[in-house]
Image (cartoon, rainbow, N blue to C red):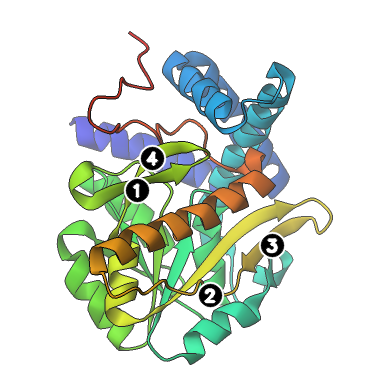
């Protein structure tokens, strides 16, 4: 019964927001984000701690401005997600403009597959969806939502233009197969990772537990690692799906050292993007939650 109630609530929100005009849906969703943020003190404290770590030189006013922008961005992205069924090859250019696409094509031309390096920046759900409509579908790494009905609903939206999920229990096998066939795999690489699958590398001047999966796969397959992200561009009045040049891998012959060095390199790419668009990253995530042995917790709100 609990699963059905949760599913019904999500379905009503998805379909209800989805029928509204886009400006109204974005405004309403942003308002909902502000309400959630106000009602959840742990999220507020996490965002405040994260911004103090990342930008210690900033004033409180600067940090509050970024949080307002983040909440707007999250609301707008939610509004875009519910509207995904309305987007097609014919109208996607009105919503998302390609920028630096030659960088993606360069990585693709290498013939070893592409690892689409990205994070929870801007309209991350829209980025892979739009790219598929432009003719470049991918497989995306995903964690299953506990409620399997909601999981199926969310992934049905994500897969409309031809994208396909890769779930954790099948990730290595499927990912290697996709890359062997010169396909593309999208990976969000900006979240806290459990120690068994991670190394600690610098992120905004503080050690962060970071996935080694991208580096290991790239070194094993020689797939091109191409950073890509969709950010809202006020001057264009639409999202700009930007691709950066492929990241050249560090190869010293020492596999474990290479994994660490390339993970550090990929993390720096993500950090640089966030520094350019700080109000379009998700500061409410506990990015520094896992600590090196002996270090005190960062988010001790008890």
Q: Which dot, 1 or 3, sits closer to the camera?
A: 1
Mark 4 vs mark 3: in front: 4
Residue named by callout 2? 246
The quarter of the displayed image where residue 218 is located? bottom left
Label 1 crowd bin: few (<14), some (14–19), many (20+), radius 10 Å: many
Identify the element where label 3 is drawn.
Answer: strand
Q: Residue at x 25, y 69 (%)?
A: 255
- Cα separation between marks 4 and 3: 28 Å
Q: Residue at x 27, y 65 (%)?
A: 166
Circles 4 and 2 in contact, beta carbons < 8 Å: no
Q: Is residue 25 visible?
A: no
Query: Looking at the image, which residue is at 69% across and 25% down?
Result: 58
Look at mark 1 in the image and give the residue it sits on: 210
Q: Nearer the viewer, residue 181 or 226?
A: 226
In the image, residue 44 lies at what x, y percent?
51, 19
Q: Are marks 4 and 1 in contact (CB under 8 Å)?
A: yes
Residue 288 in picture, x, y percent from top left: 39, 33
Q: Determine whether 280 is above or below 111 in the image.
A: above
Q: Nearer the viewer, residue 170 or 107?
A: 107
Q: Secondary structure at mark 2?
A: loop
Q: Mark 4 or mark 3, which has the lower sequence index?
A: 4
The residue that label 3 is drawn on is 240
Q: Nearer the viewer, mark 2 or mark 3?
A: 2
**On the rendered image, what quadrant is the C terminus found in?**
top left
Q: Do residues under tags 2 and 3 come within 8 Å of each other at their CB atoms?
A: no
Q: Earlier in the sequence, mark 4 or mark 2?
A: 4
Sequence-earlier tag: 2 or 1 = 1
- Residue bearing mark 4: 208
Residue 112's place in the image compared with 188, above or below, is below
Q: Is any part of residue 235 visible from this angle? A: yes
Q: Earlier in the sequence, mark 2 or mark 3?
A: 3
Is 290 on the left or on the right of 186, as rendered?
left
């Amino acid at each position: 019964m609990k699963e059905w109630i949760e599913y019904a609530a999500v379905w009503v929100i998805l379909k209800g927001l989805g029928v509204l005009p886009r400006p109204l849906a974005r405004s309403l969703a942003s308002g909902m984000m502000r309400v959630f943020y106000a009602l959840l003190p742990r999220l507020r404290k996490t965002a405040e701690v994260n911004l103090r770590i990342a930008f210690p030189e900033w004033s409180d006013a600067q940090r509050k401005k970024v949080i307002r922008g983040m909440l707007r961005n999250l609301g707008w992205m939610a509004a875009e997600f519910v509207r995904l069924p309305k987007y097609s090859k014919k109208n996607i250019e009105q919503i998302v403009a390609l920028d630096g696409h030659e960088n993606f094509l360069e990585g693709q031309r290498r013939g070893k597959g592409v690892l689409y390096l990205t994070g929870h920046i801007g309209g991350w759900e829209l980025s892979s969806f739009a790219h598929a409509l432009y003719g470049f579908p991918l497989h995306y790494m995903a964690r299953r939502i506990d409620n399997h009905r909601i999981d199926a609903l969310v992934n049905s939206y994500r897969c409309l233009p031809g994208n396909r999920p890769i779930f954790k229990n099948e990730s290595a096998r499927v990912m290697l197969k996709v890359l062997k066939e010169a396909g593309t795999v999208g990976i969000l690489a900006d979240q806290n990772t459990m120690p068994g699958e991670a190394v600690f590398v610098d992120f905004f001047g503080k050690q962060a537990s970071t996935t080694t999966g991208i580096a290991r796969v790239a070194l094993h397959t020689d797939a091109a690692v191409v950073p890509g992200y969709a950010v809202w561009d006020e001057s264009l009045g639409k999202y700009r799906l930007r691709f950066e040049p492929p990241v050249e891998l560090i190869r010293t012959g020492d596999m474990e050292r290479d994994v660490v060095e390339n993970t550090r390199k990929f993390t720096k790419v993500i950090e640089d993007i966030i520094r350019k668009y700080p109000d379009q990253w998700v500061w409410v995530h506990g990015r520094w939650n896992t600590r090196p042995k002996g270090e005190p917790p960062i988010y001790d709100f008890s």
